[in-house]
Amino acid sequence: MGKSAPDSGYLRIRAVGYFSPIWSSSGQRLFYMRIDDKGRRIESSDIRGEKVTTIFSLKEYFWGGGLCLTPDGRILFPMSEPGPRLPVYNLWEIKVDAVTGKSMSEPDVSPVVRL
């Protein structure tokens, strides 16, 4: 007989890699979510993949979906926060420099989506 589910390794598989890639309007930087042994974070890199910048590390909350880069240089992303009984998803934003890929603000709950 085959291995039982707990011994098969299937339950130990984790999502690792790069997710939700989006290009800057100039096409010179790529913004993405990265998940690995160091945690979850939003990063950017130049088109050669050489100049990588960590924009935001997600330590306390859970990232819940894709990234969106607005024309005015904000990255929008859903993230869960503890709620009274269940997690609550809010739309968060962080201002970035589309040329360097560095953050220009602290992440904050987006009050209004200003596209």
Image (spheres, rainbow, N blue to C red):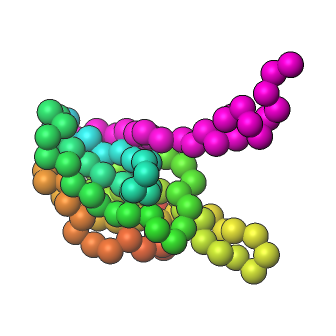
Q: Is residue 101 left or right of residue 87?
A: left
- Which image quadrant: the N terminus? top right
* Above or below, comparing residue 100 to residue 32 in the picture: below
Q: Which residues are magenta?
A: 1-25
Which residue appears at 42% of the width and 74% of the height?
108
- Which image quadrant for residue 27? top left
Farthest-out residue, top: 1
| Image position, residue 66 (x, y; %) | 49, 46
Q: Image height check: is 71 above or below 2?
A: below
Tell me what residue is drawn at x 57 percent, y 43 percent: 14
Outermost residue on the right side: it is 1
Whether residue 74 is situated above or below residue 61 in the rendered picture? above
Front residue of 97 and 56: 56
Q: Nearer the viewer, residue 50 or 20?
A: 50
Identify the image quadrant of the C terminus: bottom left
Task: Name the one closer to the observer, 60 or 36.
Answer: 36
The residue drawn where x is 82% and y is 32% is 4
Q: Is 48 left or right of 107, judged from the image as shown?
A: left
Q: Is 78 covered by the magenta stretch?
A: no
Determine the residue positioned at 39% across, 56% down.
Answer: 38
Instruction: Name the residue at the bottom extreme.
Output: 84
Can residue 86 be seen by looking at this rendering? yes
